[in-house]
Image: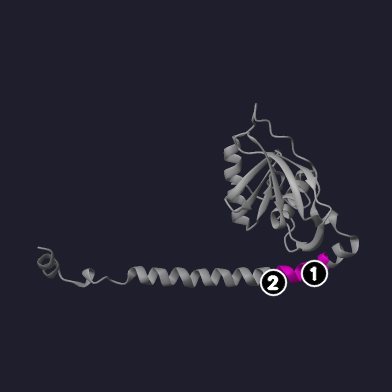
């Protein structure tokens, strides 16, 4: 199981190597599966390999067709039109920054079988891909914000952390209630379970 590296780690600021499909260091399908599992476990919508200390140019992202890996991604076109939206990052929990990104991008990549594709992404998909490709280029999203915005976000970090912990506690309690209700429902006897052996036999004879 992959785990996130520390936010101060040099790994986050070091571009990983291109993935070599002719001489792979690891099974690309295994990488896709493990990265996807880690992304879901940490509650992200995207995750790059170097965020978990893996030296490979690949990231995973949630798509309409499920989680998908993008090996050796390269942005080939970017729209001049941009938008400014709040971003967070699994590697820097409880820090949120307004980041300007292109609204639409064209990206070339290989899938886990090594086949090359070119796709166009817009909206959240385009933003997520740009964020993850930044990671693969050794750029963290903190570098995309002004010093003033970063200082404000760092000052708000304890408050954001408290909000997150409270939310997680509510989620855990709701899950506990849900599981308890399901367990009680399963333990209730059905009509046939309440019958004596003789009644059951006579009704099915």
Question: In the displayed structure, would residue 148 be above or below residue 48?
Answer: below
Looking at the image, tell me whether mark 2 or mark 1 is earlier in sequence order. 1
Dot 1, crowdedness within 10 Å: few (<14), some or many (≥20)? some
What residue range appears in magenta?
153-163
| Residue bearing mark 2 | 163
Q: Main secondary structure of the magenta part?
A: helix
Dot 2, crowdedness within 10 Å: few (<14), some or many (≥20)? few
Q: Which mark is residue 176?
A: none
> Can the viewer see residue 10?
no
Q: Is residue 200 left or right of residue 139?
A: left
Name the residue rendered at 74%, 60% in the picture.
88
| Residue bearing mark 1 | 156
Question: In the displayed structure, would residue 23 be above or below residue 5?
Answer: above
**Residue 76: percent from the left, percent from the top?**
78, 42
Q: Please state the total of marks drawn on the protein image.
A: 2
Judged from the image, the secondary structure of the residue bearing numbered disc 2 is helix
- Quarter of the image holding residue 106? top right
Assess whether residue 155 is covered by the magenta stretch. yes
């Amino acid at each position: 199981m992959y785990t996130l590296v520390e936010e101060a780690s040099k790994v986050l600021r070091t571009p990983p190597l291109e993935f070599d499909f002719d001489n792979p260091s690891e099974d690309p399908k295994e990488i896709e599966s493990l990265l996807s599992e880690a992304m879901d476990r940490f509650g992200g919508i995207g995750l790059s390999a170097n965020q978990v200390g893996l030296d490979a140019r690949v990231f995973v992202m949630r798509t309409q067709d499920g989680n998908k890996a993008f090996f050796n991604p390269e942005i080939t076109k970017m729209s001049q039109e941009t938008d400014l939206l709040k971003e967070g990052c699994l590697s820097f929990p409880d820090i949120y920054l307004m980041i300007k990104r292109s609204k639409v991008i064209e990206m070339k990549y290989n899938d886990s079988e090594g086949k090359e594709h070119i796709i166009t992404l817009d909206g959240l998909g385009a933003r997520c891909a740009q964020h993850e490709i930044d990671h693969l280029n050794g750029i963290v999203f903190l570098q995309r914000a002004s010093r003033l915005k970063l200082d404000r976000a760092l000052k708000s970090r304890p408050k954001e952390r408290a909000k997150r912990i409270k939310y997680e506690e509510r989620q855990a309690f709701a899950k506990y209630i849900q599981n308890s209700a399901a367990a009680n429902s399963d333990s209730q006897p059905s009509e046939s379970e309440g019958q004596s052996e003789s009644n059951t036999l006579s009704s099915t004879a």
